[in-house]
Amino acid sequence: MGTQLVSRRRSLSAMERVLFALALSMFGWHSSNLIITLHGLLGFGFDNWTTLLRLADTIAVISITFAYSFLLHVHIHLWANASDRPLKRSEKVRIVLSYIPTMFLTVAIYKIWTGQYAPMLARVHLLVIPMAAWITYVLGVIAITELLIARKTRNLSEQRIMRTLAASFVAIGIVILAALALGLGEGTQLGLYLKTIANLGSLLPSALLAYYIYRYRYLELIIEESLIVASFATVVLTIYIYGIRTIGDWMTSHYGVRPGVVEALLILVLALAAAPLRGWLEKRFHKLFEREAALYRQIVSRISSHAGKYEQLPELVDFVERETTKALGLRSVRIVAGSRLNLEEEQENGRRSKSDAPIEPWVEEILNLSGRDGWGPVEDNPLLDTQGYTIAYPLRRDERVSGVLLVDAAAGTLSQDARSVLEILAGQVAIAIEDCRLVEENVRLERRLAERERLATLGQMAATVAHE
């Protein structure tokens, strides 16, 4: 993800630039924490590698200070986007004010690089309480913004995830305020737990960054697989360090079991359980992000916002084909619209559209195959292969079939997410085509009425002249 961010840094929008800066700050925060953690695990002590520790502390304090300013900045943009408007002047002022806490970095950096080395929180303890209050304020504003955006969206799953995020921000903000600012449980076991949870709260910006980049497809990054692999590796490492090794040492010390035997057996059990565990994680991430809902909303919103601009069916079909191909990364999409299976009904009602082209025999056969299969998609069919398509979806609204959606995609492109989008999109396209036909029919009726009125007027004038 970082490589793609850097490669596209010159073509980013305003919000994407803030997300890029947020990603850099989180990279600096976690990298510096990794260095400090490895230094402690290797047992070097504070007397060795102090320059590296000071540098890591400096990067950490700069990164975490800017991270919450970037978070507030991003959410101001998100609120403006949710309202479908540019930033107001007051919001631009709020963005500038959100970076005021970074002015105190000079004091923190001076403390870190002067005097005998000590951990960062010990050196900048005077700034801990103000920083905790600032973080609590930012998390509260973010929670309110999430709730307001949730009220504007019509997607129920998106409403749930935003409310969940808002609740988690409020909870972490309360814990940070209690543990770091108010010193609740200081010197007790409860205090240690609260500080641990407060420190884990620093993972929230990373999780939120990944969520927004993936769900709303900012920067065109697909990171679900990376998140699954990273989470799987974290779970396995945690099980090994705190589970397998602990149980192995306990069995060796209490029952005299040969060292390494229990650990080897438990590693074998973990290897056998690895595939089901990864599958479970994949399902949980898929349910969390619901990429198909995001893609569906993006495409359908474009169709609904532009469909009324097209008075002729070919123009609408061309628009849908172009947008669907671009949004889903397909090779080509073709919509064959016509009366098809409803020819007799439309001829009886006298409302067949002039835009309907004569049906091709192979398309008729594809629709017949889909009808026999309960109007499901047709795939891996010789008829489609000869025409250069991979899969076909019938365009069906209620009992009317208005055409077929033909898709040509590269191998591996048609994931379960893309199939879900195409299946739902086919119904929306059928509705759009029917609406466009209704517009055409209304235009024809209005022309007929106008022609009749003109003829009636001419007849009345002719009768008047003849009478005179």
Image (cartoon, rainbow, N blue to C red):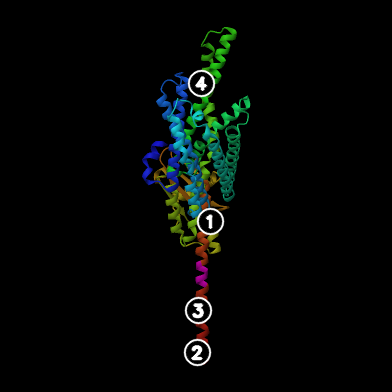
Look at the numbered disc 4 and give the secondary structure of its residue. helix
Residue that numbered label 2 is attached to: 465
- Please state which of the two labelled residues, at mark 1 or mark 2, is closer to the viewer: 2
Magenta highlight: main SS: helix
Whether the magenta-drawn stretch holds residue 447 is answered as yes
How far apart marks 3 and 2 lie (CA) works out to 15 Å
Sequence-wise first label, 1 or 4: 4
Q: Amino acid at mark 4?
A: Ala
How far apart marks 1 and 2 lie (CA) works out to 49 Å
Residue extending farthest bottom: 468
* Magenta range: 443-448
- Please state which of the two labelled residues, at mark 1 or mark 3, is closer to the viewer: 3
Look at the numbered disc 2 and give the secondary structure of its residue. helix
325 in relation to 357, above or below: above
- Badge 1: how crowded within 10 Å, few (<14), some, or many (20+)? some
- Please state which of the two labelled residues, at mark 1 or mark 4, is closer to the viewer: 4
- Badge 3: how crowded within 10 Å, few (<14), some, or many (20+)? few
How far apart marks 1 and 4 lie (CA) works out to 57 Å
Q: Position of residue 339 (x, y in %)?
A: 50, 57
Residue that numbered label 1 is attached to: 342
Residue that numbered label 4 is attached to: 271
Whether the magenta-drawn stretch holds residue 34 is answered as no
Look at the numbered disc 3 and give the secondary structure of its residue. helix
Q: Residue at x 53, y 62 (%)?
A: 438
- Please state which of the two labelled residues, at mark 3 or mark 4, is closer to the viewer: 4
- Badge 2: how crowded within 10 Å, few (<14), some, or many (20+)? few
- Badge 4: how crowded within 10 Å, few (<14), some, or many (20+)? few
Sequence-wise first label, 1 or 2: 1
How far apart marks 2 and 4 lie (CA) works out to 101 Å
Sequence-wise first label, 1 or 3: 1
Residue that numbered label 3 is attached to: 455
How far apart marks 1 and 3 lie (CA) works out to 34 Å
